[in-house]
Image: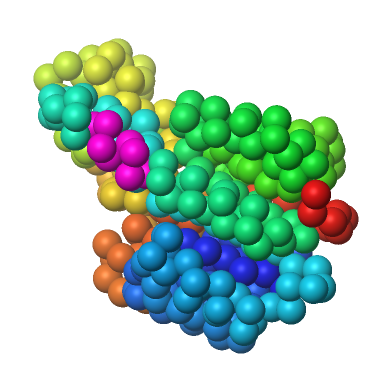
Amino acid sequence: VPCVDLFSSVGGWSTGATQAGHRVVLAVDCDPIALQSHALNHPTARHAVMVLGPDTEEALVGLIDACVDRSRPWHLHGSPPCTLLSPMQRAATAKLQTAPADVEANTAKGLALVHWFLALVRRLRPTMFTFEQVNHPAIRSHLDELKRQRPGSFDYRVTHFQDFGVPQERTRLIGGTPVLIDRLRHDPALRAPHVPIREAFAVPDRAAHVRSACFGRKVDEALTVDHGDGTYSNARAEERQRTLDKLCWTLPCTAAPTWTEAQYRCVRQFTIAECKVLQTFPADYRLAGTKKDQLRGVGNAVPCAFARLLMSDYRLEPPC
């Protein structure tokens, strides 16, 4: 099935769809470096750098019509930017004591693109569609209303990607055509065992924990207690670190997790190759730009393995 990937970033969803046997014909994003990464790995797709939204909708529809025969089966995917809606952003604005009016303005800006994409789905009526976002109550409320209005066209599920073999804790709201979401909700063939850190990676020498990227790399070593038997404790550090038999922390787009010793000292940050593992990209997936560009692109991506499962065993259903 020909697929259109909006807000494509470096191509996590596109890669999973391609692995499932589909054909990505158009990828659109406002970030030219992320789109360059997409093009390196999906050279047969058309690529367009565009700030998506109401102002560019007619140009976008023209691009889609140039790439897709909408009288035949096709798939539309969208992952509108989640930065302004993410729990990390809400925590950061609370810490900075951001004015309530500014918080509301940022939230409204993030929601506007979500509403625009879902309105585009109603306009274009793709044979099937998928949608990925953070689990925000306002988005759930909007989708609940769409489900009431058009129960044959819209559904969603709050999804824990670790239940589908992704080696990190990562919770997202997945929307789409009901037949796809129903399978996501009920098909046990899609489920996979959790993958702990030690099974996902070649663990570096001396590494005993992984520290979340959200907490930086410094630990107050004065609080570390040596128990004399090769074990250590540090209550403050343990709040921010996980042993290797646990799932890894969620990969953000701003910083990589850190490998740490038994004494909680830093070994090193995750490499870009290790961040790709967290998002289940192929090892040979090519990325353009600086390390910061690459981390932002990988951190913003839909995990490829999840997209592949969702797009596999594809059952076409006409729009309602």
Q: Quadrant of the rendered structure where residue 267 is? A: top left
Q: Nearer the viewer, residue 1 or 284?
A: 1
The magenta span reads: 103-110
Q: Residue at x 17, y 16 (%)?
A: 223
- Give the mark count: 0
Considering only vertical position in the picture, is 14 above or below 224? below
Q: Nearer the viewer, residue 236 or 138?
A: 138
Where is residue 58? Give x, y as percent.
49, 72
Per the picture, the main secondary structure of the magenta-coloured stretch is: helix
Is residue 220 in sight in this rendering?
Answer: yes
Q: Quadrant of the rendered structure where residue 196 is? A: top right
Q: Is residue 238 left or right of residue 279?
A: left
What colour scheme has been applied to the protein in the rendered image? rainbow
Q: Nearer the viewer, residue 132 or 61?
A: 61
Magenta residue check for 33: no
Where is residue 23? Give x, y as percent.
71, 75
Q: Residue at x 60, y 75 (%)?
A: 64
Where is residue 272? Give x, y as percent.
38, 61
Instruction: Give the quarter of the figure containing the N terminus.
Output: bottom right
Q: Is residue 61 left or right of residue 260?
A: right
Where is residue 201? Give x, y as percent.
52, 50
Considering only vertical position in the picture, is 185 above or below 70? above
Q: Nearer the viewer, residue 133 or 307?
A: 133
Considering only vertical position in the picture, is 169 above or below 109? above
Considering only vertical position in the picture, is 33 above or below 203? below
Q: Quadrant of the rendered structure where residue 148 is? A: top right
Is residue 212 in sight in this rendering?
Answer: no
Q: Is residue 185 left or right of residue 199?
A: right
Q: Residue at x 85, y 54 (%)?
A: 317
Q: Residue at x 55, y 33 (%)?
A: 142
